[in-house]
């Protein structure tokens, strides 16, 4: 993966459009997943990702060597989304809940996803949804996207220790929510496969 | 993505100091530990050895480690959220519409826009090649070599949440389901291509009549010459299933004490047939897979659309397509005429339709279909 990654990056920097579309194809699912963890505003996510890739293409010759396109993309997407959220606030754009169409869409999507999951995952999912946005984000970055503490710290502009604390607090809260919901332990059912 | 989390000096050596640190860890300490999470999410040879050795040294930590591992795995799945499926395409279209190509490529402008739009379709195939290729050759990190007698064994294990595809030394393909482990003699040295399986896997075997391909799963042995089939043999489940997609295999129980060739007591499985082996009863039952797959494309038959055709003609065509034996009384059904096409619907859906139309019934017996009907007036 490492060599593929840097070879692809090299070709892309030289203006290879196939490499560009491959980069897009390879990372878009993860980036969308991450985007929807940070905000519910679909248009904002789509615009941010589109801008990110356009920026990537237009400035490809000035981009530095990178040993991880993935880390770069995640960090840039996060910065972009947060910046755009700020801008949107100023112009008082309506909140996402005012678009009934989207609410239905996302809901349907998550319904399908839930059907295929175990009961444990489903209730864990519900519990995660009760966490703060930042906690949801850090949990996803750590366990789903598999970034380590140091990378997450750099991405979120906080210290390693803060990442750890954030994760630790999230775990405690998840336990509480699940106990409330009647799940004695975090993994009551599947702990032993 | 690999930062220097690997303990140093791993060539066969386990860093004992580092293990000491983990000896007093509680479940949450593991969940918050980078090296631990990295092992759960992307295990490799080094980390597998490390944690296996750790648990041997500190067996009292087994519960904490297993619990932490399950929680990390659950978190990995549960923290993923749904995404509207059309976003991916819509964003790409947006990007392509605004692309300014490299200056020296200006004359290709229009061409590129077209190509970019077309690439959405082609990409998945390409991506598969470029990005998945590390998986098709067994990732060196996942191959564990153990020396027993003078043969070297290789082990492939899928610790991920998704099925993984590997290429075997004879270019056969195997898709290993999560939790699946296979083990075989390195390079398939020896007179047969033999491997043992725990868990669930699909095999697409290259033809080599001189060197049969044998899969052993618990007590059950599946022998093939060149075919594709899947085996489900989870340690904890009470039965083992073998399903044949194409080709022919023989399935038999492993020889216990009698010297007689165990294969002679086995069963031959044809395409779309499956055998279920109930461990406790040591009994094999042959039936059909849930959704039989066409073995040839209906359109390649001379006739695949039928108008006022005798049912036997239709059934014969179906036999050819699915390579499944269908037993019925030709004389009785010859007078039944039907309109149908064999291109849509599954085998069983078609059978339902036909049987309802002619007031007949069917059942699957020993991997074959038997139709019972009356004369049509």
Image: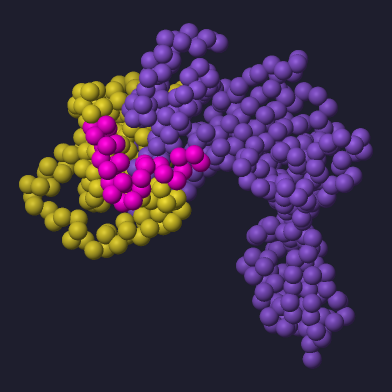
Q: Is residue A186 magenta?
A: yes
**Relative to A156, does residue B369 appear above or below in the rendering?**
below
Expressed as whole percent of the image width and height from the top left, the position of residue B323 reads 78, 59
Q: How is the image coloured?
A: by chain
**Of residues A36 and B37, which is closer to you in this image?**
B37
**Relative to B311, does residue A65 appear above or below in the rendering?**
above
- Quarter of the picture holding the N terminus of chain B: top left
Count of numbered labels shown in the rendering:
0
Would you say residue B103 is visible in this rendering?
no
In the shown orientation, is residue A62 left or right of residue B282?
Answer: left
Expressed as whole percent of the image width and height from the top left, the position of residue B123 reads 47, 43
Expressed as whole percent of the image width and height from the top left, the position of residue A46 reads 27, 47
Q: Which residues are magenta?
A: A166-193
Residue under the image location 45 percent in, 40 percent down: A191
The image quadrant that residue B7 belongs to is: top left
Expressed as whole percent of the image width and height from the top left, the position of residue A173 reads 25, 40
**Relative to A149, does residue A26 appear above or below in the rendering?**
below
Residue under the image location 69 percent in, 46 percent down: B240
Chain B appears what colour? Answer: purple
- Quarter of the picture holding the C terminus of chain B: bottom right
Q: Which chain is yellow?
A: A
**Of residues A125 and B256, which is closer to you in this image?**
B256
Would you say residue A187 is visible in this rendering?
yes
Residue under the image location 57 percent in, 22 percent down: B140
In the shown orientation, is residue B312 left or right of residue B70?
Answer: right
- Residue extending farthest to the bottom is B377
In the shown orientation, is residue B141 left or right of residue B223?
Answer: left
**Relative to B300, does residue A59 appear above or below in the rendering?**
above
The image quadrant that residue B137 belongs to is: top right
């Amino acid at each position: 993966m490492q060599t593929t990654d840097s070879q692809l990056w090299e070709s892309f920097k030289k203006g290879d459009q196939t490499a560009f579309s491959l980069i897009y194809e390879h990372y878009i699912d993860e980036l969308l997943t991450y985007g929807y963890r940070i905000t519910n505003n679909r248009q904002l996510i789509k615009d941010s990702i589109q801008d990110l890739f356009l920026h990537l293409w237009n400035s490809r010759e000035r981009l530095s060597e990178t040993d991880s396109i993935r880390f770069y993309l995640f960090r840039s997407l996060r910065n972009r989304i947060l910046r755009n959220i700020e801008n949107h606030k100023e112009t008082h754009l309506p909140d996402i809940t005012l678009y009934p169409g989207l609410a239905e869409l996302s809901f349907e999507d998550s319904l399908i996803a839930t059907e295929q999951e175990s009961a444990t995952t489903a209730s864990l999912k519900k519990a995660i949804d009760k966490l703060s946005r930042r906690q949801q984000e850090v949990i996803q970055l750590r366990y789903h996207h598999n970034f380590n503490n140091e990378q997450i710290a750099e991405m979120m502009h906080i210290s390693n220790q803060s990442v750890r604390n954030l994760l630790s607090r999230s775990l405690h809260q998840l336990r509480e929510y699940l106990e409330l919901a009647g799940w004695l332990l975090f993994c009551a059912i599947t702990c032993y496969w | 993505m690999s930062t220097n989390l690997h303990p140093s000096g791993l060539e066969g050596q386990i860093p004992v100091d580092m293990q000491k640190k983990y000896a007093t860890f509680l479940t949450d300490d593991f969940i918050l530990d980078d090296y631990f999470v990295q092992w759960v999410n992307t295990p490799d040879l080094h980390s597998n050895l490390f944690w296996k050795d750790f648990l041997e040294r500190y067996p009292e930590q087994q519960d904490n480690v297993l619990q932490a591992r399950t929680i990390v795995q659950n978190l990995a799945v549960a923290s993923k959220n749904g995404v509207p499926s059309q976003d991916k395409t819509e964003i790409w279209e947006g990007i392509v519409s605004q692309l300014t190509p490299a200056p020296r490529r200006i004359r290709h402008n229009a061409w590129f826009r077209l190509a970019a739009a077309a690439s959405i379709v082609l990409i998945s195939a390409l991506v598969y090649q470029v990005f998945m290729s590390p998986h098709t050759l067994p990732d060196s990190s996942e191959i564990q070599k153990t020396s027993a007698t003078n043969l070297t064994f290789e082990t492939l294990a899928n610790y991920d949440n998704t099925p993984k595809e590997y290429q075997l030394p004879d270019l056969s393909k195997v898709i290993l389901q999560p939790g699946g482990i296979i083990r075989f003699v390195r390079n398939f040295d020896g007179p047969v291509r033999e491997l043992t399986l725990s868990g669930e896997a699909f095999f697409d075997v290259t033809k080599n009549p001189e060197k049969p391909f044998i899969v052993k799963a618990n007590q059950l042995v599946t022998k093939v010459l060149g075919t594709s089939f899947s085996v489900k043999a989870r340690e904890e489940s009470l039965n083992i299933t073998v399903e044949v997609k194409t080709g022919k295999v023989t399935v038999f129980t492993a020889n216990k004490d009698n010297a007689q060739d165990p294969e002679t007591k086995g069963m031959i499985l044809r395409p779309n047939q499956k055998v279920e082996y109930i461990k406790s009863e040591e009994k094999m039952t042959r039936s059909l897979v849930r959704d039989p797959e066409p073995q040839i494309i209906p359109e390649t038959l001379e006739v695949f659309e039928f108008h006022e055709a005798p049912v036997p003609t239709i059934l014969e065509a179906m036999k050819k397509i699915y390579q499944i034996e269908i037993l019925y009384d030709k004389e009785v059904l010859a007078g039944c005429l039907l309109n149908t096409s064999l291109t849509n619907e599954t085998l069983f859906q078609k059978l339902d339709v036909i049987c309802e139309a002619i007031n007949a019934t069917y059942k699957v017996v020993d991997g074959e279909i038997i139709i019972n009907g009356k004369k049509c007036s």
